[in-house]
Amino acid sequence: TIQFDARSWETENSINPLETPKFKVLVSETSATDRSTFTQVGDVLQPRFFDGTNWTNSFVIDRGSESKIQKGNIVIYGQGLVGRVIATGKGWSKILPIIDESSKISFCTQDNKKSLGILEATSNGALTGYMLDSKSDVGEGDIIITSGMGEYPAGIIIGKVSKTRYDSDKQLLKVEIKPETDFASMDRVSVIL
């Protein structure tokens, strides 16, 4: 395992990542839908920390530019979307998960790629969104995937619809999503290069 330099990280970010839980990290040079060539390369550090303006849900892995990880790379857990790399350097990469309230994701249903919507996280980490067409045929149990519009490539599983309701004031079909990734028990992630 590559050693994580806590001294330089702590100086830059005012935290000690070595006091946080460690997980395995996998890195792949394949597409988002072909997960056949992952290789183990290190540990994941998962701190929740103050960034100077507010509390965030970001976490840090101990691989970075030396492993060809770049800002914008996609991070998954199993088949589920975790988030994206928002900063990287030698020996570290910072990940912004989809459950952070600053995340917004374009999605569609797995069965109907024309049934598009916008997903965002709430302050408590829940995923909610709305369908662009209020007459979309989306229901509980439907699998939601990335649409390919925006920052994420098409076809990565986000989760399942747990609830739908029509908001007559805004004339929108709203959805609640149960993420494919269980962020509370996540023990390994993959970075798609």
Image: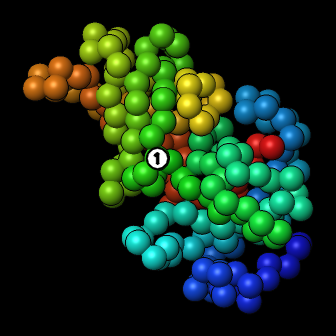
- Crowd class of label 1 (few under 14; some 14 to 19; many from 20; radius 10 Å): some
**At which x and y percent is residue 137?**
35, 11
**At which x and y percent is residue 49?**
50, 75
Q: Quadrant of the C terminus?
A: top right
Q: Which of 30 and 143 is in front in this view?
A: 30
Say whether residue 162 is left or right of residue 30. left
Which residue lies under the disc numbered 1? 103
Q: Please say if 99 is above or below 57.
A: above
**At which x and y percent is residue 62?**
77, 69
Say whether residue 126 is left or right of residue 189. left
Tell me which corner region of the image, top left, top right, bottom left or bottom right, holds residue 156: top right
Amino acid of disc 1: Ser
Asked if residue 81 shows in the view, the reply is yes
> What residue is drawn where x is 43% and y is 19%?
116
Q: Please say if 67 is above or below 15.
A: above
> What residue is drawn where x is 48% and y is 27%?
107
Say whether residue 105 is left or right of residue 73. left
**At which x and y percent is residue 170?**
16, 26
Q: Quadrant of the N terminus?
A: bottom right
> What residue is drawn where x is 32% and y is 14%?
133
Coloration mode: rainbow
Q: Please say if 132 is above or below 83.
A: above
Q: What element carries label 1?
A: loop
> What residue is drawn where x is 53% and y is 36%?
158
Say whether residue 48 is left or right of residue 120. right
